[in-house]
């Protein structure tokens, strides 16, 4: 959507897209299709603890870092509290203030002034205008604007003050962000619906408890003159600020890589038609004890041998336990760990919600510059919240790995009886290669077998193969003998 152009001698000029100001909040500009409307007003509303103040403070802080001076004024917290809040997130607000890129103003009102009935917004605008002119401010955040409006019981007065503020901001072409509490009709609090009609963009933040897990969500309610992503998006407040991981970019837009990566086992490569495709997604699924971690560790060691950086995320056991257990199978992860190319992170699924786990995992991926990511086991993600949340986690993870060229390997613990039910079915369309590991009983003996269910674009084996976990690694007993082209 665009703004209407001027009429020229040759007829109407073509409309121009509205100008946008980046928020620099991770993932947000993507769903806003570029950022907030420049020179216009955006409203961020939500209940207590939903992240409104953090949102506004991060916007003004990151814009100042990017060379856009700004002012932050709060009607709920004093300036020193705001600075301490920023420091807890690693933001050095005083340094930006000293550099003249940021002003933090204390908007808390004197109760005596309120009781006298002499207050109006003109005094505030005079102070704000003087500061904005002196520093050349481009952005303004007014935190808890409802704190200003609630000083009066006169709804007409409240609306007049807000309209005066809105006109003042528009005349000065300031990119403004207002935060306000959202109240339900039964909360007994005042509501300010007229603000929603006045502003050009509305972001709604929500914090809810679902299945005893606290989750935060963000939704763009409206955006005049621009298209935007209309879904509700999970977000988290990390130790460095707000992070969204949207699925606004299709996971199917990644480039195909013709490079084939060895698994580190010649017979396994033969079954797969050569190995695993780089930047693809592979799932190893099977019951406990079928050898999923052994095969995943073999692939990790081979990636290390090629000089690739590997991040192994372990949801089932500690790093020392895993490393020690693999030694009994002749799989020594210690040299790869000592080289720094392999990093094993053991995480407890129940300690964080889905969003926090995903953000932590993506942070680890970037920090390690991982080229191969192994998640053992994705079945543990249901312990973070619900099946739907686990699916959301895996879709977003895949959506992050593919464009980044990261090869993703996941293990899944299924029941004793092989089945495609559950999480495997939910994510099957995302996966390029599926290898099922099973126990099979023959003549009173239990054998391990593996079956390549699919491997897109590869001429893979289509039958079961027996294998052993020996003291020198995985040994596949029988070779393919036949093959079938995968889809």
Image (tube, grey):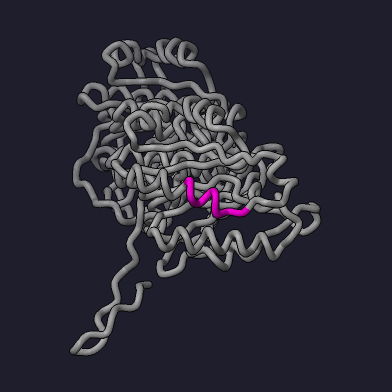
Q: Residue at x 34, y 66 (%)?
A: 18
Residue 286 visible somewhere in the drawing:
no
Q: 122 or 470, which is in the foreground?
A: 122
Position of residue 58 relative to residue 8, above or below, is: above
Based on the picture, tell me whether residue 122 belongs to the magenta stretch: yes
Q: Picture coordinates of residue 167 (x, y %)?
A: 49, 64
Q: 25 or 130, which is in the foreground?
A: 130
Is 207 on the left-hand or right-hand side of 198?
A: right
Q: 307 or 232, which is in the foreground?
A: 232
Q: Work out which quarter of the rendered image holds the C terminus and state it.
A: bottom left
Based on the picture, tell me whether residue 398 belongs to the magenta stretch: no
Q: Picture coordinates of residue 452 (x, y %)?
A: 39, 43
Q: Which residues are magenta?
A: 120-127
Is 434 on the left-hand or right-hand side of 357?
A: left
Residue 250 placement: quadrant: bottom left
Residue 8 placement: quadrant: bottom left
Position of residue 259 relative to residue 329, above or below, is: below
Q: Residue at x 62, y 39 (%)?
A: 108
Residue 40 visible somewhere in the drawing:
yes
Question: Most prominent secondary structure in the magenta stretch?
Answer: helix
Q: Residue furthest bottom?
A: 10
Q: Picture coordinates of residue 483 (x, y %)?
A: 29, 48
Q: Residue at x 43, y 37 (%)?
A: 103
């Amino acid at each position: 959507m665009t703004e209407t152009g001027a009429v020229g001698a040759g007829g109407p000029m073509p409309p121009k897209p509205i100008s946008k100001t980046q928020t620099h909040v991770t993932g947000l500009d993507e769903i806003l299709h570029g950022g907030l409307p420049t020179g216009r007003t955006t409203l961020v509303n939500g209940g207590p603890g939903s992240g409104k103040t953090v949102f506004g403070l991060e916007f003004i802080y990151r814009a100042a870092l990017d060379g856009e001076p700004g002012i932050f004024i709060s009607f709920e917290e004093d300036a020193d509290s705001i600075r301490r809040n920023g420091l807890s997130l690693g933001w050095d607000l005083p340094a930006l203030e000293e550099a003249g890129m940021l002003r933090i103003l204390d908007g808390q009102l004197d109760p005596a002034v309120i009781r006298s009935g002499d207050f109006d917004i003109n005094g505030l605008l005079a102070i704000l205008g003087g500061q904005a002119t002196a520093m050349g401010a481009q952005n303004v955040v007014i935190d808890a604007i409802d704190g200003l409006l609630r000083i009066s019981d006169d709804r007409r007065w409240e609306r007049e003050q807000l309209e005066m503020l809105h006109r003042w901001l528009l005349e000065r072409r300031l990119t403004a962000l207002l935060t306000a509490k959202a109240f339900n009709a039964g909360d007994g609090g005042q509501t300010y619906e007229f603000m929603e009609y006045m502003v050009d963009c509305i972001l709604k933040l929500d914090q809810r408890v679902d299945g005893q897990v606290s989750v935060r969500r963000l939704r763009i309610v409206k955006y005049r003159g621009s298209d935007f992503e209309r879904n509700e998006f999970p977000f988290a407040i990390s130790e460095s600020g707000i992070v969204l991981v949207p699925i606004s970019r299709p996971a199917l837009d990644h480039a195909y890589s013709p490079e084939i990566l060895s698994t580190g086992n010649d017979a396994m490569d033969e079954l797969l038609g050569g190995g695993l495709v780089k930047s693809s997604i592979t799932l190893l699924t099977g019951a406990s004890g079928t050898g999923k971690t052994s095969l995943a560790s073999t692939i990790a060691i081979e990636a290390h041998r090629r000089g690739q950086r590997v991040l192994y995320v372990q949801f089932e056991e500690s790093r020392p336990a895993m490393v020690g257990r693999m030694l009994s199978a002749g799989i020594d992860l210690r040299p790869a760990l000592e080289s720094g190319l392999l990093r094993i992170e053991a995480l407890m699924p129940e300690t964080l919600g889905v969003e926090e786990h995903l953000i932590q995992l993506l942070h680890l991926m970037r920090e390690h510059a991982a080229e191969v990511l192994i998640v053992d086991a994705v079945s543990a993600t249901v312990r973070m919240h619900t099946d739907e949340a686990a699916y959301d986690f895996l879709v977003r993870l895949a959506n992050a790995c593919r464009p980044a060229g990261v090869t993703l390997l996941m293990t899944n613990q299924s029941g004793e009886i092989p089945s495609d039910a559950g999480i495997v079915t939910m994510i099957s369309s995302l996966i390029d290669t599926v290898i099922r590991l099973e126990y099979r009983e023959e003549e009173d003996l239990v054998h391990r077998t593996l079956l390549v269910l699919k491997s897109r674009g590869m001429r893979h084996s289509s039958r079961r193969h027996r294998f052993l976990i020996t003291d020198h690694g995985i040994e596949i007993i029988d070779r393919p003998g036949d093959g079938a082209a995968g889809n």
